[in-house]
Amino acid sequence: MKRTTLKIIIGIILYIILLYGNSVIRKEAKAEVKPEYMQDVPLDEAHFPDEYFRAELGRCLDENKDGILSRQEREKIYYLQLNETFGSSLGNLWYSDMKYVEYNGYDREDYLVYHSSKSRRSFQLGEKTYANQTCKILYEGAENWSDKIDLTGIEYFFNLQEVRADKYELLSGSFKNNVNLRKIWVGCTNLGNKGYHHVQKDFPVSQLTYMHLENIYANELDIEEIAGLQVLRVILPDGSGRRLPALNLSKNIKLKELELKNIMPAKLDLRKNTKLQSVKVYSGKCKTGQSYGRDLEEKHGYVYYLPEKNMKCKVTFAKKNNIQTLYYFTADKTIDISKLSKLEDFQTLKSVKAKAKSSWARKTFKKKKWGCAVVKNGKFIKKIKAGKKKKFTII
C-alpha cells in the first residue's frame, strides 16, 4: 500500500515537472527569433510582395544596393512609423497631453517614442513621393491618400520594438512574429474603420507594454491577457459616447497610465492597480476653459468635457496608490479621492463634489506654496480651506 502511494506521489511530481517544463519551452519558443529572420533576405516579391514597400526598403535600408537586406542593415530598426501626416506637430512624441504646457513642446517625457538607450533611427512610410534621402518619408494631402500597403516581410525586422500607424485601415500584414514588439500606437481615419479584434489579429497583444488605440471600436476590449501592460489609452471622437460592457484590470498590476475617452464602463475597479500614476476618464463635448501661459503671444486654455447624462463611471481606488493625475469628466456627481494622497493634478466638472482628506488639503494648499492643480470646468481653484477638526473636505 505504501509503495503504491509512493508511486502515485512520484508520478504526480513527474507530471508537474513535465507540465512546467513544457510551459517554459513554449514561452521560450514564443520569444525566440526564427533563424531565417537572422539571415540575409532578398528584396524580392517572395519576401516582400508589396512593390512600394519593397522599393522603399531598398531605397532607405539597402546601403550597398545589392538587392539584399543583410542582418546588419535590418538590426538597426527599432521603430516603424506609417502614414505620418506632413508637418505633424507630434514630431517624436507618441501623444500630446490634454493640456498644453509650452508653445514649443510638452513636459511629459513619458510620451517620447524613442527609448534613450537605442539609436533614433526609424523607418517611416508615407506617400510615394519623399522629401529627402533619409529614412523619413512624409506626405502631403493626407486626406487624398488612399494607397494601401502590404507589410508582409515586416517579420524580418527582428529588433522592431515600437510601431505607430496613423492610418491603420490602409495596412495589411501581420506583426505576430515580431517577438520584440512592445509598443503600438494604432489609429484610424474614421471611427469604425477597424475594431479591436483586428488589432488582436495583427499584433502580438499579449506581449505589449504600451497600447494606444484611436478611432477603433473597442467594445470587446479584453486586456486580461496583457499582463505586462503599463500604458493603455482608448481614444474615441468627441460625442461618440460609447460604453464598455466591463473592463477587468485586476490582472494588469503593472499598469501605470489609463486613459478612456468617450468609452467607459459603468464601474472601474482599480484596487489591484497600485502602480497607476495617471487616470483619465472623460466623455462628451470638449470645451475650452481658463487661458494660461507666460508671456506667450498665443495663450492656451485648459480643456474640459460636458458628458451625456447616462455616461457615468464609478471609480474605486486602491488604498495605497501612486496616482498623481486624475481627469474625471463623467455624469457622476460625486467622487471619493480621499485615498489619493499623492494627487498633484485633479481636473473635473464644477458640479462634481470630490471627497478629499483634510490633512491632504492642509498640506498641499498653503498660502505661499501651491502644490497641486485643481481645475473645475477649466477654471483653476487655487485655495482649498480645510478646518482643523475636519477629517474630510468636499472640493
Image: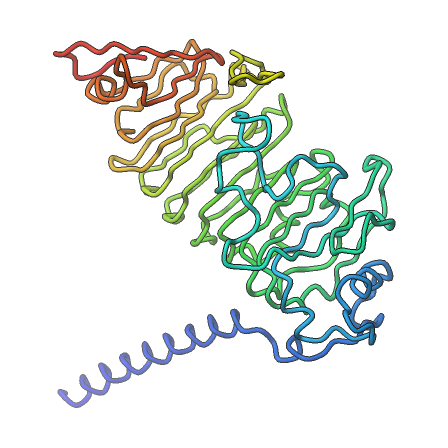
Q: Is residue 200 above or below residue 365?
A: below
Count of numbered labels shown in the rendering: 0
Name the foreground residue: 220 vs 70: 70
Name the foreground residue: 230 vs 385: 385
Q: Residue at x 42, y 77 (%)?
A: 22
Q: Is residue 284 above or below residue 342?
A: above
Question: Which picture quadrant has residue 119?
Answer: bottom right
Q: Is residue 212 above or below residue 124?
A: above
Q: Is residue 304 visible?
A: no
Question: Which picture quadrant has residue 69?
Answer: bottom right
Name the foreground residue: 64 vs 236: 64
Q: Is residue 129 shown left or right of residue 346?
A: right
Image coordinates for residue 200, horizontal then vertical, percent:
60, 52
Image coordinates for residue 127, horizontal then vertical, percent:
83, 47
Q: Is residue 311 shown left or right of residue 52?
A: left
Query: Which residue, as the protein is rendered here, is positioned at the far front?
Result: 295
Q: Is residue 20 shown left or right of residue 286?
A: left
* Quadrant where the image shows the N terminus: bottom left
Name the foreground residue: 143 vs 300: 300
Q: Residue at x 66, y 73 (%)?
A: 72
Q: Is residue 214 shown left or right of residue 85?
A: left
